[in-house]
Amino acid sequence: MSHSLIVRQDIDFLLHDWLGLDDIADRTTVDAVIDLSEKLAIDHFLPHYKQADVEEPTLTADGVHICPPIGEALKHYADLGLFSAGFPEELGGLGLPYLACAASFAYFAAANLATSAYPMLTVANARLIATFGTQAQIRHFAIPQIEGRWFGTMCLSEPQAGSSLADVRTRAEADGQDDLGDRYRLVGNKMWISGGDQDVSQNIVHLVLAKVAGRGEALPVGTEGLSLFIVPKYLPDGTRNDIEVAGLNHKMGYRGTANCLLNLGETTGAIGWIVGQPGQGLRQMFQMMNEARISVGLGAAAVGYRGYRLSVAYANERLQGRPAGVRDGPQVPISAHSDVRRMLLAQKAYVEGALALCLYSARLVDDESDADSASLLGLLTPITKTWPSEYGLAANDIAIQIHGGYGYTRDFDVEQLWRDNRLNPIHEGTTGIQAADLLGRKILRDGTGMIVLEARIATTVERAAAVEDLAAHGVALSAAWVRVRDIAAQLGAGDAGHLFDNATPYLWAFGHVVVGWLWLDQAILASQKCTASDAEAQFLAGKARAARFFFECELPKIDGWLAVVASASMVAAEAPPSTFQ
Amino acid sequence: MSHSLIVRQDIDFLLHDWLGLDDIADRTTVDAVIDLSEKLAIDHFLPHYKQADVEEPTLTADGVHICPPIGEALKHYADLGLFSAGFPEELGGLGLPYLACAASFAYFAAANLATSAYPMLTVANARLIATFGTQAQIRHFAIPQIEGRWFGTMCLSEPQAGSSLADVRTRAEADGQDDLGDRYRLVGNKMWISGGDQDVSQNIVHLVLAKVAGRGEALPVGTEGLSLFIVPKYLPDGTRNDIEVAGLNHKMGYRGTANCLLNLGETTGAIGWIVGQPGQGLRQMFQMMNEARISVGLGAAAVGYRGYRLSVAYANERLQGRPAGVRDGPQVPISAHSDVRRMLLAQKAYVEGALALCLYSARLVDDESDADSASLLGLLTPITKTWPSEYGLAANDIAIQIHGGYGYTRDFDVEQLWRDNRLNPIHEGTTGIQAADLLGRKILRDGTGMIVLEARIATTVERAAAVEDLAAHGVALSAAWVRVRDIAAQLGAGDAGHLFDNATPYLWAFGHVVVGWLWLDQAILASQKCTASDAEAQFLAGKARAARFFFECELPKIDGWLAVVASASMVAAEAPPSTFQ
């Protein structure tokens, strides 16, 4: 059981029963891909989980070397066609829906988050080029990634420009044209580049945000001055591009993913080809960033999920203590203690809730041509990135607690899961950045997603009203929804200079409302589904119980968070610097 | 500033202005000890913080070796008489109050939690022997520890008996008498022994819980069958006792503290002398456990405190982004962003609140001859252990978030602080164990602490009523107190078999009420104190603001936790095993 990473019944329930994947894909193909993914993840991603944590990437004169089994795992991943699965047939893919690919990815992330980062970035990179690149760019730079021979990165941050992309200083000077498009020479430093170098793929395709300016000209101001460039490690003629690995970042976790500081163009200027037009960089990159944000959430959910399953196994094996009031006789498994059950159920509600959220959003990606789905996806993206990152981590924290002292040792996996997962609230936009995106851009500036979400929540609540055990949850959800909706409107009408003061507690509450909604929606389905076996009945009862836990123990927390938001407290915002010594 | 571990003004405020240390100690002496502690912590504990994380203890044929600077630091600690500071003069000490020693200890724990664990355990061990041992035992085993030449451990857990001490299987067979008392031969395995072996001290005094039984006799049942033994590494004649280090635990953090599995008596039986009478073991050991619980809380608070101060320094230096609405011009320090200020203020409220709680409890130790103080200390011990462990860790999590990607690297200290602190909710009784102690033993069985606490809260609320900005907080605190008090009574009158189902959420709420009370009490003092300088006025304003944050952003959270407690939800307790797959 500890070798089953994610409960297959859960994946089947989510994909087929809940999200209607069968409407857009052939179930036999999907099932085969999931089978394959689970097997490959267990056979080739899981075994080097600890090894790659200990044997960190190294940097020598000829570049970065990563722990060898990572390369072997990714070779298998390529051989089985998993890089290509989500691409259309004309690009050599299987044309699988994004949802199916996300479910496949969850197994790899659960087994080994750091190793799974390479294909995640590669696929997102290739998809961006396939969307915005020229035919020649697609042929030359996307196809080898779809085949898994080349890997991709995203190069946004710089040492002085982390969350503030307007401050990117990498400069791109025009350098003529060729059949790959308008050519530029790039000079700059790119920080936090995951997979920035490695010794596995034949080439690396960097997608680089930079600002177009002639020599001696000032860089354009703001994010609208950003352009996007394809900057390969090896140029089409096989020579090295002018890209130097200046250093490796030594991380607390997630160590198998080589994370680099890259110096571009210190000698001759790094050669890159622009994607689209100058100034479109950030808009295009947002496709990759949004995809990465969903993947971050999904990875966090998957890592939380594995910790949960390890906890279940441990709690059923570890004998300790006796039921209250019993003095003698054999010790019982700790899963018999109600406080341990509370911790198991909290984990279940967190990780299954997080997985459901991520797959729901993945389904919206497949429906993105529909305006409502696109709007809702925009609204849910910051939640899909953040909620699993925070609660997958919280689940991993509980997993350590259930393991007690053993969980604190490196003889068990749960401490590493916790360390690995801690990156997720930081990269691809911190929680604070997501909170500002949610409240400022998605709710108050756009707002269409809120209309769609309100309608969908109303539908769920209406259906819940007809189910005896769930009607009260529907009422609670409705009230919670009205509260977060109205508070956003109130903030929008308030002092613009203080709009974001409590955006993060607002995001916490909004996230809980969204996850509560999805739990209720699943509970309704669980209550209505005809069961084919005892095992299925137990599975559905488990879903119902986790949903009930969420409504009894989690949703009530939003009042505490919203108290400060609703009062527009400036206790922190107005704190003078001398407060902090 | 990053080299000042804990704000000295804060320590002075807490010790002298708030807790009245000057009533029981000479201020000049205390100030000198604190000066010395801060300097020694910075000069000799802090420098090997990272080194001891990387160079873990090793086990060879001649025992455990620890990173050399740890030994050097502890040599200085002994040379300066810090092992002895809290002991009476007749035992070679300075007779300093426990409160002053706790304040001193906070500096060492902040600088290097793992190194500080050795003296913490040694002092607690010596104090137990000084309390319950014979004169000969004190002279032979306590004095060398008070002099810092020998170190001490506490040996409770066994592989099959972690939280369940009733299941200890270490057997002690009577083996005559000598001038050190009744002698026994011990056979058993002791797990998780911090400082179980090392190459620094001349001897190690293990305090071992075991069960007295003749060969072939059944062990006595339950915790009342536990007895306490002094089992030294080296016997009085200089020969090795029969104690073998069977292995080292490889931890996620806290690595400088060698943590061992000890096999006692595999050859001839380990020789030990009983402390007190058979069957008194747990009662006696509780003195050391309670002291260790306060120290765990204090260490967690101190580690959180250092992370907070590192965050403040980083947030004031790191330039990123601009104020909302500003497009151009230089980037500003991230401490200018309201979300970062929220994170700084949350940390301040957590770590200063945690430190205040621990020092308040330390003051109660000094007053323990007073029945009210003793009762209140008993009630507050599980909170003093748990709240700083949970919120010191939460503060460290925020510290990483403020550092962004940098905080996730080992180039900064905050990731290690977070790893180190994660042990604290586990050892010396997990959060779940503390919750059961609070609700079952301290509130419902004893109850006298509740009467004292209610009276003290009432006094604080009454004083707050006279301060314009604080009166409303007093009202909120009163209501919160009545709520936790009444819910405990309700639980006590309910189904005994389900008493502990939601004990942990109850503990969360109770902890917040206690810390809220202490914040309000400090805020009253801050509002009334005459200020001698602008710096002092700013310091006091900071205290007032942190208190306000706690009441606006933290105390409202208790309703969410108590919802499930008050409803006596059995959603987790009644979950059938099939729920968890």
Image: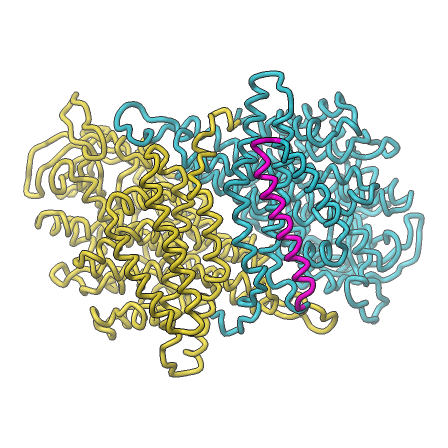
Chain colours: A cyan, B yellow
Q: Residue at x 66, y 68 (%)?
A: A495
- Does residue A259 show up magenta in the picture? no
What residue span does the magenta drawing correspond to? A467-495
Looking at the picture, tell me which residue is in the foreground, B545 or B426. Answer: B545
Looking at the picture, tell me which residue is in the foreground, A356 or A532. Answer: A532
Q: In terms of secondary structure, what is the magenta stretch mainly?
A: helix
Determine whether B349 is above or below B123 in the image.
below
Q: Is residue B111 left or right of residue A237?
A: left
Q: Quadrant of residue A171?
A: bottom right
Disc tally is: 0
**Residue A488's x, y, as percent?**
66, 57
Q: Quadrant of residue A174?
A: bottom right
Looking at the picture, tell me which residue is in the foreground, A23 or B46. Answer: A23
**Residue B25's x, y, as percent?**
21, 70
Q: Is residue A495 left or right of residue A394?
A: right
In this view of the protein, can residue B204 be seen by the observer? no
Determine whether A276 is above or below A530 in the image.
below
**Residue B8's x, y, as percent?**
37, 71
Residue, far top: A533
Determine whether B441 is above or below A272 in the image.
above
Q: Residue at x 63, y 54 (%)?
A: A430
- Does residue A487 show up magenta in the picture? yes
Q: Quadrant of residue B475?
A: bottom left
Q: Residue at x 41, y 37 (%)?
A: A339
**Residue B201's x, y, as percent?**
26, 50
Looking at the picture, tell me which residue is in the foreground, B433 or B88. Answer: B433
In this view of the protein, can residue A259 be seen by the observer? yes
